[in-house]
Amino acid sequence: MTSAVLLQAFWLVFDPYVLLVILCSAMFGLFVGCIPGLSATMATALLVPITFFMPPVPAIAAIVTATAMAIFSGDIPGALLRIPGTPASAAYTDEAYQMTLKGQAEVALGAGLVFSAIGGLFGTLVMVMFSPSLAEIALKFSSFEYFWLVILGLAGAVFIGNASVLKACITLLLGLLIACIGLENPAGMPRFTFGMNELMSGVELIPMMVGMFAVSELLRYITNTDPSPIIATEKIGNIFAGMWDLLKKYRWPLVRGSALGTIIGIQPGSGADMASWLSYAMSKKFSKEPEKFGTGHVEGIVESGAANNSSLAGAWIPAIVFGIPGDSITAIAIGVLYLKNMNPGPMIFVNNPENIYAIFLVFILANIIMVPLGWLTVRLATKILRVPRNILMPIILIFCIVGSFSINNSVWGVTLILFFGLLSFLLEENGFPVAPAILGVVLGTMMEENFVTSMIKSDGDPLVFFTRPIAMWLAAGTFIILLWPVATWAWGKLRSPTLAA
Amino acid sequence: MKFNDTLVGAALLALALTILQTVQQYPVIPGQNIGPGAFPGLLAVLLAVCAVLLIIKGLKAKEREAWIKMGGWVKSWFHMRNFLITVACLLFYIFMSDKLGFLICATLILAVMFKALEVRTKLIFPIALVTSFVIHFIFYKGLRVPLPWGILMPLQW
């Protein structure tokens, strides 16, 4: 049975059309990641309208491949311009740039590439091993457990991050409220539609994401007053030279980074950015030569380069098994899965196991072809970095317009990208993180359904949420995350009353 | 453009109260204690709590911040103008694409944006035109998106 499914998955992936999609999205991802100001999330948001026209497997393959590539190639402008191509590279941008100044650009980029690929494969391995058994457990879940899972995911989005917890809470609530718009609620009652027919079916996810992640980034580029950066070096040697020695020398940091990255990816609400910051900090803590960090030392790049790519695969575990996204990229991907009638959740392992195995295969394939394609991108890097952005950005704007139009063939989509582009631009200017909002929108409907179903089942008695055994554990986990910041704050106050005063 | 936390909090509080008021008017489902208003109502209450906390945070801030702090881009005419042009381009598409058609709108938007971002004058029109046609070809022919023809309808291919 399994081998037959595996064979089926194999045929799904090794189809000329799917392979072509993978190749094109790989090049697209490498290009977008390499351009400062265009993030991996933006790459996904721009791809989604095109995947709208594809069957499920190539659609997901496109997203998986493009994001893996973009997360790696974000290292390139980091090393050459000191500007991270994507936020996930920001943790070690200074380190990589210092190496470039020392004439070691090829070591920094080579480490970024090779260890990204290994980290990605590590995360994939964990995903392949654990998601089927997790799905079996998940089959036993009822609305109570799902309610807690959603809360757990949302709590993670709010409390594990760099931004202010209060502001993250607010954007999360705004996202959940946006999900309330329209007819799609347990009571089937049109809510907050302002009498507009377009809002009856709710706010469409794709134009909203294009607005929040592509249009807002465009606006940020246009309003960016920083002078344009200078490329630090033209000469990049053989990036694979010396990688074997690095691999032998830093095998523990590599494993540690990959493992931490995968775990952070699994934790809903925190993705590649967090993974790379935390593992860079951890690498410095455990290093034998912490004093070298920040002066152009490759160890931190090895560890957090592996971590940010492994977190990508990790984030897919809760996304596929429970339908709860691990970061904003998987939030977008879940939106695509719903559009393809491939609703994520444990049933997908029963109904379409071949599709799941196909996704696993795509992950492996993407991380393998990353090595030659990444090498090519580094060779062309100085040329890509010179692509005139004042020509590129308006073209992206037209893509946003066409992409959002094509979802319903109406300008309503364009109206949505304008609204959400401006909203998300303003929110970020004011220090409000946008990722919790998108998780809120994706999870809002699911949360309300499970909340209402559970309340009806229990005749309005909220205590039932705590009585089922698994639900109780999930509740405990949620409260630990919720109370963690309070506890550390209180602990800090207790321990150093003099310092605080 | 950074607004003072107190200001943002007040706006959010107003939003939360409006939602609560709207939700009150939703019908109750007979025989059930949980109606369509319950979930958004709960969210609105939480939002109100967060808004109040944000207002307090803004008021307690050590250094009194200006109500609205303009970012560097608002002061620079070049950046402010380009921001407004981008928004105007999207509005232009929303209102004019049915009449003028995709090709004309896209070419105009690209040309205006290129001009604003100081692309060399010689290149502006050729790139705008070619890009519009390429995108039109990909989406109209390749993905069969019915992009509007507008006044170019007689030329439809």
Image (cartoon, coloured by chain):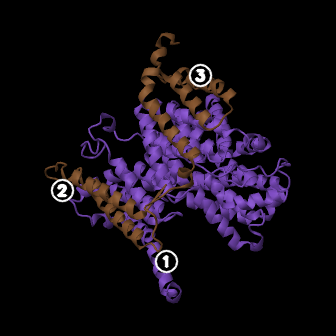
Question: Disc 1 sits on a residue from what chain?
Answer: A
Amino acid found under the numbered disc labelled 1: Thr
Task: Tell me, by letter, which chain the rendering colours brown.
Answer: B
Please name the residue shown 64% across and 64% down the image: A279
Neighbour class for label 1 at 10 Å: few (<14), some, many (≥20)? few
- Quadrant of the rendered image containing residue A33: top right
Circle 3 is placed at which residue position? B133
Mark drawn on residue A488: 1
Please name the residue shown 41% across and 49% down the image: A441
Mark 2: which secondary structure? loop
C-alpha separation, residue under disc 1 versus residue under disc 3: 58 Å
Question: Disc 2 sits on a residue from what chain?
Answer: B
From the viewer's perspective, is A86 left or right of A191?
right
- Quadrant of the rendered image containing residue A140: bottom left
Q: Please check whether the numbered discs 2 and 3 fall on a single chain.
A: yes
Mark drawn on residue B33: 2
Amino acid found under the numbered disc labelled 2: Asn
Chain A colour as displayed: purple
- Quadrant of the rendered image containing residue A9: top right
C-alpha separation, residue under disc 2 versus residue under disc 3: 57 Å
Of tags 1 and 2, which is closer to the observer? Answer: 1
Please name the residue shown 68% across and 57% down the image: A306
Of tags 1 and 3, which is closer to the observer? Answer: 3
The answer to the question of whether label 1 and label 2 lie on touching residues, with beta carbons closer than 8 A, is no
Q: Position of residue B21 (x, y in %)?
A: 22, 54
C-alpha separation, residue under disc 1 versus residue under disc 2: 39 Å
In terms of depth relative to the viewer, which is nearer, A109 or B44? B44
